[in-house]
């Protein structure tokens, strides 16, 4: 069991949770967390917001029963932390953009630490959060509230673009990657697909992703996939 260091409310329903742990992890990987015994049945996946030698940080949005129980955690409380799991973002070089939408900014903070010369684009539908923390790490920071953050990103300026956000944003990033062919320069676009999960370890197929080479598992083969690999059905 891991011990909660802090669990701070940052914005409406958005919390920054810090937990004592030396388990670490890579950028884009996730943990399965539970702060209860039997109900809900399943642990809940959260991306690594930052991994330090003595702690793991998470950023989460309260959407249902499990995350509501996370929001009740106080310093000193215990929770179960399994991981790190998944295949995350690669360590790359060149011109890099990190593009996050809403709570999708969570895994990009770790990327900003690991890839400190990146340009960062953060989009929010109503209220911005964690922007000051990102500003300290960004070569350049662009924040948008109420619009479409992807509209601010010129794909021809970058070699690698990491995207995490709601499903329509990921699909729009893929379309933008396809359209970039006409500019003569197409970056590598990596999408973090936070599909619903059950086991988190590749055993149940709940997180199945349609890819050009067949069905793959978001929890083990991903959650990060190249934009060109994924087939979006809706
Ligand atoms: C790899 C991965 C990393 C994630 N990282 C983060 C993170 O860093 N921060 C964060 O806040 N959330 C993250 N999520 C989403 C998070 O796991 C869910 O919000 C959480 O499991 C919901 O649990 P709940 O019991 O509160 O809500 P539930 O009662 O299970 O669901 C409440 C509502 O949320 C919807 N929902 C649940 N899970 C998802 C999902 N994965 N995608 C879209 N809608 C969903 C349900 O359809 C339902 O409408 C991640 C998911 C994955 C798969
Ligand atoms: S969540 Fe079970 S296989 Fe991915």
Image (cartoon, rainbow, N blue to C red):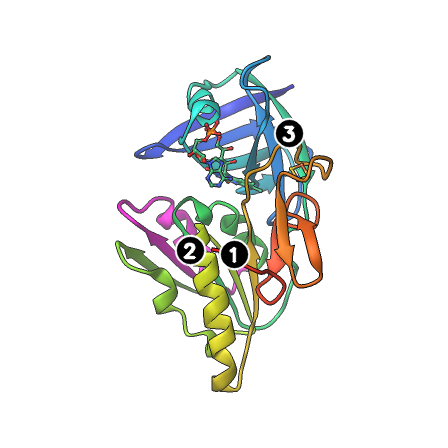
Measure the alpha-carbon separation of dots 2 and 3.
34 Å
- Between 129 and 188, the one lying in front of the other is 188
- Residue drawn at (28%, 44%) of the image: 127
Tell me where residue 31 sits by quadrant: top right
Label 3: element kind = loop
- Residue drawn at (43%, 50%) of the image: 166
Q: Position of residue 51 (x, y in %)?
A: 60, 41
Q: Position of residue 92 (x, y in %)?
A: 64, 65
Q: Earlier in the sequence, mark 2 or mark 3?
A: 3
> For the residue with label 3, is its CB less than 8 Å from the closest atom of ligand 1?
no
Which residue lies under the disc numbered 1? 233
Q: Which mark is residue 168?
A: 2
Q: Earlier in the sequence, mark 3 or mark 1?
A: 3
Label 2: element kind = helix
In the rendered image, the vertical position of residue 103 relative to residue 150, given as above or below: above
Image quadrant holding the N terminus, namely: top right
Which region of the structure is painted magenta? 116-139
Q: Position of residue 29 (x, y in %)?
A: 63, 45
- Residue drawn at (63%, 38%) of the image: 206
Which residue lies under the disc numbered 3? 21
> For the residue with label 1, is its CB less than 8 Å from the closest atom of ligand 1?
no
Q: On the picture, is 99 further left or further right than 88?
A: left
**Mark 1 neighbour class, 10 Å CA radius: few under 14, some 14 to 19, many 20 or more:** few
Measure the alpha-carbon separation of dots 1 and 2.
11 Å
Res. 112 in view: yes
């Amino acid at each position: 069991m891991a011990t909660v260091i802090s669990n701070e409310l940052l914005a409406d329903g958005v919390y920054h949770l810090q937990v004592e742990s030396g388990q670490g992890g890579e950028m884009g990987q996730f943990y399965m967390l539970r702060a209860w015994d039997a109900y809900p049945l399943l642990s809940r996946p959260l991306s690594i917001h930052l991994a330090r030698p003595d702690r793991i940080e998470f950023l989460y949005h309260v959407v249902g029963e499990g995350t509501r129980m996370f929001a009740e955690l106080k310093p000193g409380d215990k929770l179960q932390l399994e991981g790190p799991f998944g295949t995350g973002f690669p360590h790359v070089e060149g011109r890099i953009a990190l593009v996050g939408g809403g709570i999708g900014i969570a895994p990009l903070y770790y990327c900003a630490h690991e890839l400190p010369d990146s340009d960062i684009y953060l989009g929010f539908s109503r209220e911005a959060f964690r922007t000051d923390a990102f500003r300290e790490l960004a070569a350049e920071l662009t924040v948008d509230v109420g619009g479409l953050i992807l509209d601010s990103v010129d794909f021809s300026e970058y070699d690698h673009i990491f995207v995490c956000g709601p499903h329509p944003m990921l699909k729009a990033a893929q379309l933008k990657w396809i359209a970039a062919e006409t500019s003569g320069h197409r970056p590598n676009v990596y999408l973090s697909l936070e599909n619903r999960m059950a086991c988190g370890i590749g055993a149940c197929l709940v997180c199945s992703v349609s890819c050009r080479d067949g069905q793959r598992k978001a929890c083990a083969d991903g959650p990060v996939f190249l934009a060109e690999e994924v087939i979006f059905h809706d």
